[in-house]
């Protein structure tokens, strides 16, 4: 079993060398087969049904369960590509998929952001989280950032910028705000001079991992007495752009969304026109009806 999963992980890494899919899928498979206690060639669709029930009883997030199902389905597809006598894929998409309603992005209140950054004393960490907050970088994009991706001293009239490889290895350009540019410069000034292209290094002088970045943030959250995820910085960045009146098509480019519909979700968490219309309507209704009670 272990050798098949290792081969599967190597196959995923070859297909998408810069993505973290091979790590997540390997972890998902390890969890699934530890739960099933059966060889991979004895797994049936009924076992997948039971696994979904188990995950739901444990209150696992719908997105997490669907990703685990995708990992198992992709693993059996890999087996069929490698071996003509591979077992049938037990994951049936029309049967083994949990519908997920539309969920709005959860941003962070500005006062919580201020409280969190007040306890971040490391130049490296200030730069990492400022890139997420002011440029909308995903945690994996921060982790993969290399020195040759930076253009910090552009020609006159141009903004400092980064070249990013986002989801699906799609490249995009991200501009640096004054805050992000200053934080990044402060880190690069004290960054150890090691022969590694990574912008952000761990204490051993190697590229930070996604888990390492998330652990750093969790430590700061405990110090600040609140809880924020890396991706919530990105949501907050989008909310700030909406509140500043930036066109949704521009926000789409800055976030690297393939579909405008994804970006439009952010319009719902900070819709100034809807707020104004609601407030005007309530003012009219309050003037019309006296519902304060009393004689």
Image: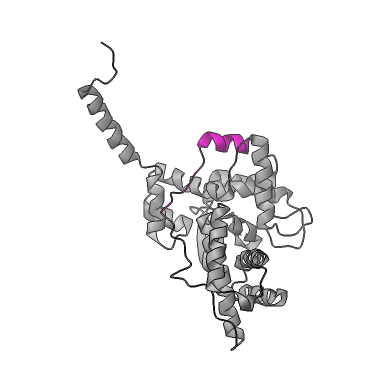
The image position of residue 152, as x and y in percent, is: 59, 54
Determine if the magenta segment contains residue 160. no
Left or right of 197 on screen, residue 109: left
Determine if the magenta segment contains residue 118. yes
Q: Determine the residue located farthest toward the left in the rendered image.
A: 288
Seen in the picture, residue 103 relative to 72 is either above or below; the reply is above
Q: Which residue: 65% across, 65% down?
A: 23
How is this picture coloured?
A: one colour
Which region of the structure is painted magenta?
102-120
Q: Which residue: 63% across, 65% down?
A: 32
Seen in the picture, residue 55 relative to 279 is either above or below; the reply is below
Seen in the picture, residue 38 relative to 161 is either above or below; the reply is below
In depth, the one of 66 and 252 nearer the eye is 66
The quadrant the N terminus occupies is: bottom right
In depth, the one of 7 and 59 nearer the eye is 59
In depth, the one of 140 and 152 nearer the eye is 140
The image position of residue 34, as x and y in percent, is: 68, 65
The answer to whether residue 32 is visible is: yes
Q: Determine the residue located farthest toward the bottom in the rendered image.
A: 84
Left or right of 25 on screen, residue 3: right
Number of marks in picture: 0
Left or right of 170 on screen, residue 216: right
The image position of residue 155, as x and y in percent, is: 53, 56
The image position of residue 3, as x and y in percent, is: 72, 77
The answer to whether residue 186 is visible is: no
The quadrant the C terminus occupies is: top left
Q: Determine the residue located farthest toward the right in the rendered image.
A: 204
């Amino acid at each position: 079993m272990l050798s098949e999963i290792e081969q599967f992980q190597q196959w995923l890494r070859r297909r998408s060398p810069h993505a973290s899919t091979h790590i997540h899928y390997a972890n998902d498979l390890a969890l699934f087969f530890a739960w099933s206690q059966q060889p991979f060639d004895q797994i049936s669709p009924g076992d997948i049904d039971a696994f979904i029930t188990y995950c739901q009883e444990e209150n696992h997030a719908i997105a997490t369960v669907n990703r685990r199902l995708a990992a198992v389905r992709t693993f059996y597809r890999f087996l069929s590509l490698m071996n003509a006598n591979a077992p049938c894929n037990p994951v049936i998409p029309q049967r083994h998929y949990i519908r997920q309603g539309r969920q709005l992005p959860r941003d962070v209140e500005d006062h919580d952001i201020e409280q969190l950054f007040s306890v971040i004393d490391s130049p490296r960490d200030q730069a990492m989280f400022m890139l997420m907050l002011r440029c909308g970088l995903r945690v994996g994009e921060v982790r993969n950032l290399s020195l040759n991706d930076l253009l910090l001293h552009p020609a006159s009239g141009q903004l400092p910028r980064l070249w990013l490889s986002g989801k699906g290895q799609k490249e995009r350009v991200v501009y640096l705000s004054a805050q992000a540019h200053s934080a990044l410069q402060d880190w690069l000034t004290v960054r150890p001079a090691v022969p590694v292209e990574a912008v952000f290094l761990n204490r051993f002088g190697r590229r930070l991992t996604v888990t390492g970045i998330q652990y750093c943030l969790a430590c700061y959250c405990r110090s600040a007495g609140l809880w924020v995820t890396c991706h919530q910085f990105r949501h907050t960045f989008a909310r700030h752009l909406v509140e500043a009146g930036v066109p949704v098509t521009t926000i789409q480019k800055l976030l690297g969304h393939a579909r405008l519909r994804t970006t439009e979700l952010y319009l719902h968490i900070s819709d100034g026109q809807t707020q104004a219309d609601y407030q005007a309507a309530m003012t009219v209704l309050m003037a019309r009806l006296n519902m304060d009670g009393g004689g």
